[in-house]
Amino acid sequence: MKKIDKFFIIICLLIQVNLFDVLDLTNTALSAVMTYSQKKLLLVVVIIYSIFSLFFYRRKQEYQEHFFTFFVWLFVITSSLVILFTALRMNQTVLSTFFIGYNSFIILLYFPLRSALSDRKSVEYFVQLVGIFAFCFAISKTIQSYILGHTGRSILFLNSTLDVSSARSMVKNYFGFIRLASATDFVFFAFLLMIVFVGLGYKIFTKKVNLLMLTVYVIYLFFVGQTRIYLMLLLLILGIVILIKLKDKISFGVISVLLFIIAIPVSLMIAYIVNLLFFKETSRLISLSIRQGAIKYYLDNILYNGWFGFGFARDDVYNNLIHNTYMTGDGQIISFNYDDVGIIGFLAQFGISGIINMIVYLSSLLIAFIRSSRKFANLLLLSFILGSWASVSLFDPQRSFYLPVLLAIMDFVSSSQEENILE
């Protein structure tokens, strides 16, 4: 990996973790371009990185198939058309509409990354970097959560409105931690990469350090992040790893059948345990009811603008249309959000064009899986990519960084002809 790649990747990671919340970004000009859900600065870095990679330097690249080129360009073209037609049909300027849907273009990061992550040493360096960033982020948030829960004071800044809301409500779980979920996406992403590449025999860190870092990730995800879908995915991935360890006794076909048979009951059991440990029954029922209402509302309006849905309608103008805000009988104001319903939120914006993109996306994932000799490693990645569709879609603004990275990683895993230790 060239120094220029390392430079841009470090910048991207620093933006993604909000500089570890050591600065109060909410009171600066950066609040409009770099927060948990604002990724405008990240897009600027991605564009500059892509231009540098394309025109200013060439790198020696190992043989590697590129499974997602067509999907990425299709998504970029589709997003551009949705921005243009949203502006025309919703009486918005193209510029204001672009600043709503700009995160769709962060997927362009796939092109420089697929070249940068095309050899073993580069991938090891990248996973080490992500692992260290996530470890520091998880440690700081866990300590902050504990101190906040017991003293009411915050030792670092809270740049995520989600964290601010949790801190104000001071709702604790049974272990005395305040929920600070802004680091959950990044920490789980690091956990996934560590599991995949440590399992493949890559020298990320020493065995003791690997175990320490994975333990810290799990502690944060369970006690501080407290995001149900991530807890379920974490347990699912650990279950797959256990099955992988039984590969000498059970064939891949048998394991696939077992996964299919036990997927539903195991998922229900995991959901029950997670809710029992971390969430009150009333809050669970309210959350479930809101999500069910949101799914129905968004699906009913998937053809709102013909071949696309709501598009990138301005929130300040079309708030009731986008969120369907209403008041319940007890006076509680309820509103729906795209990022509460995973891939349904994406389809609510893109409509039929979104369905076409998903068909191409799934086809590309399937082709990469079939051609790969590392099917269990791909299975772990797919478990996250597809499992996240339920409520934490990678097409949401706050997670748009992870999609191109995972696509580049899948290119490498599916193309590499190295000895397969995991499988």
Image: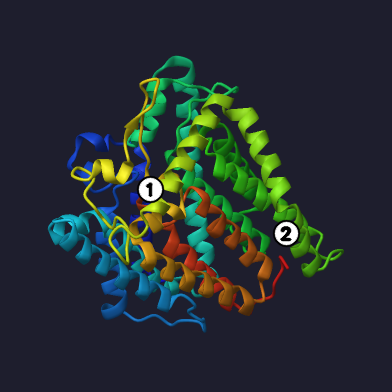
Residue 223, placed above or below residue 44: above
The residue where tag 1 is placed is 338
SS at mark 1 in the image: helix
* Residue at image coords 57%, 28%: 279
Q: Are marks 1 and 2 in contact (CB under 8 Å)?
A: no
* Residue at image coords 71%, 55%: 241
Name the amino acid, label 2.
Phe
Instruction: Tell me, for residue 260, which label it has, or none.
Output: 2
Judging depth in this view, the residue of 207 and 165 nearest the camera is: 165
Looking at the picture, how far across and down is residue 7, in whole percent? Answer: 34, 62
SS at mark 2 in the image: helix
Residue 293, placed above or below residue 192: above
* Residue at image coords 44%, 73%: 114
Crowd tier of the residue under label 1, counting other residues whose Cα lies within 10 Å: few below 14, some 14–19, many 20 or above = many
Judging depth in this view, the residue of 393 and 11 nearest the camera is: 393
Task: Tell me which label, 1 or 2, sits earlier in the chain.
Answer: 2
Residue 416, placed above or below residue 34: below
